[in-house]
Image: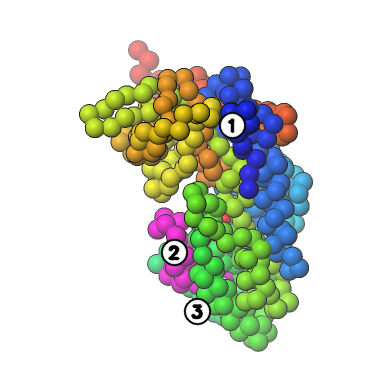
Amino acid sequence: MDHFEYRDGVLHAENVPLDRIADEVGTPFYCYSTATIERHIGVFMDGLAPLDATVCYSVKANSNLSVLKILAANGAGADVVSGGELTRALRAGMPPGKIVFSGVGKTEPEIRQAIRADILQINVESEPELEAVNRVAGELGKTARAAVRLNPDIDAGSHDKISTGRREDKFGVEWTRAHEVFTAGAALPHVELVGLAMHIGSQLADLQPYRDAFTRLRDVTAMLQAGGFEIRTLDLGGGLGTPYDDTPMPSPAEYGAMVREVIGDLGCRFLFEPGRVIAGNAGVLVSRVVYVKEGATRRFLILDAAMNDLIRPALYDASHTIVPIAESADKEREPADIVGPVCETGDTFGERIPMPDMNPGDLVAFRTAGAYSAVMASTYNSRALVPEILVNGDQFAVVRERIEVDDYLARESIAPWLNG
Ligand SMILES: *Cc1c(COP(=O)(O)O)cnc(C)c1O
C-alpha cells in the first residue's frame, strides 16, 4: 500500500500532483511520501507485536535526513554501516540506545565514533574486528557492547549480489565457530558480548530461508546459553522484500508470526533491521521524456534520468514499473525501450515495455524507487546529483537540493604545474 495514486488523470504523491513538483523543481527528482513511510513502519512494528522488539531501520536503504526524522518520530532506531550513516542517524535525532553498527570493514575511527556515541551495540563480523573494538574501547577507557554476526550458511534465494548468508559470502562469522568466538570475547576486558546477529540477504520473497536461518540461530543461542553465556539481544537483520511487480511478498505479520514460532521463546530482546520494506514503495523517481526515437527495430523513449540517478536496473537487473504521470485515456499500448542519456548500453531501464503514446516533454514515474535508489546516485557523465523531495499531505519540500556540476567543480582543481 502506498500513497501514489492517480487523481483527475494525474499521478499524485498524497495530495500533491507530481507534475506540479516537476514544474517547480525540474526533473529528474525523487519524491517520497511521508504517509507511506509512516504506514510501512507502523505495519512492520504491529507485525512484531508482542515480541520484545526494537526496529533499527537500515539507513543504507534511504538515508535522507527527513526520512530518518520521520522514522525516529515513529519509534525507530537505526542500523548503520559507516561512520557517515552514524552521523546522519544522530543528526536526525535517533536515540543512540537504538542504533546498531553493522558491516565487515569498520575502521578504528568509525569504531571510536560508535563507542563515543554510546550506541546500543556494534555487530562484529570477525575476530580481528572484535579485537579492534576491544583495543579502541580500552584507549577510550570504556567497555563496548558488541554482538557477533553469524553466517548461517543459508541461501536467501534472492539476487546473487544481495545474498549475504552463504558460507562463501564475506559476511559474519561461520556459525559453527560461535562458541569459540564467545570464549575469546570473554577474555577481552573492554568488550561485553551481548548477543548474536544475522542478516541473510535482501528482497526475500519467501519465509523459508529465514525459517532455516533462525532455526540455526536458535540452536546456537541455546548452546551458548547452556555454556553459561548471557545472550541478551538477537538481531535478526532485514531483508523482507517489497513488491516491484505483482510478485506476492510475505507480510510483516506473517514474518512476525514466523519469528515468534521459531525463536520467540528464548527470553531475548529482538532487533530488526528492515530497510527496503519500509522505504521501497515510499518513493518514486520522476523523469521527463527528452526524445522519442524510432530505432531500426525498436522504439526508444529517451529520458532525462539515467543510470547515475537509478542504478538498480544496471546493477541488479532490477525492473521498476514505469508509468506516465498523465494518465492516458487511450488504451492502446506499444512496446518501447526506456533508456537514459548516459553513454552505456547498460543505461536501459526496461526493454519492450508496453507504453501509451508518449511525446517529448511528457513525464514518467518509476515506482518503488524509495530504497537503494537515491542513495546510490552518482554524478557519472558529469551529470547533476539528483534532488529529493518529501511530500506530506498538501505540502512538499526539497530535502536534498540538486547538486549541479558547478557545485562539485568548486571542489575540483587543476594541478598547479598544469597552470602554465
Ligand atoms: C542492507 C542491510 C539490511 C537491510 O536490508 P533490507 O533488505 O533493505 O531490509 C539490514 N541489515 C544489514 C546488516 C544490512 O547490511
The circle on residue 11 is: 1
Q: Amino acid at mark 2?
A: Gly
Task: Say what amino acid the circle numbered 1 marks.
Answer: Leu
Extreme-left residue of the structure: 296
Task: Indicate the position of residue 324 as horizontal and vertical percent values.
Answer: 50, 31
Looking at the rendered image, the disc whose residue lies closer to the viewer, 2 or 3, is 2
Distance from disc 1 to disc 2, alpha carbons, whole Å, reads 34 Å
Query: Mark 2 — residue?
Result: 157
Which picture quadrant has residue 149?
A: bottom right
Most distant residue in the top direction? 420
Toward the bottom, the furthest residue is 226
Disc 3 CB within 8 Å of nearest ligand 1 atom = no
Mark 2 CB near ligand 1 (8 Å cut): no
- The residue under label 3 is 176
Q: Name the residue located 59 percent from the left edge and 31 percent from the top edge.
A: 11
Q: Nearer the viewer, mark 1 or mark 2?
A: 1
Name the amino acid, label 3: Thr
Asked if residue 139 is positioned above or below residue 182 in the image, the reply reads above
Distance from Cα at disc 2 to Cα at disc 3 = 22 Å
Q: Secondary structure at mark 1?
A: strand
- In this view, the residue in front, 300 or 103, is 300
> By what rule are the colours in the image chosen?
rainbow
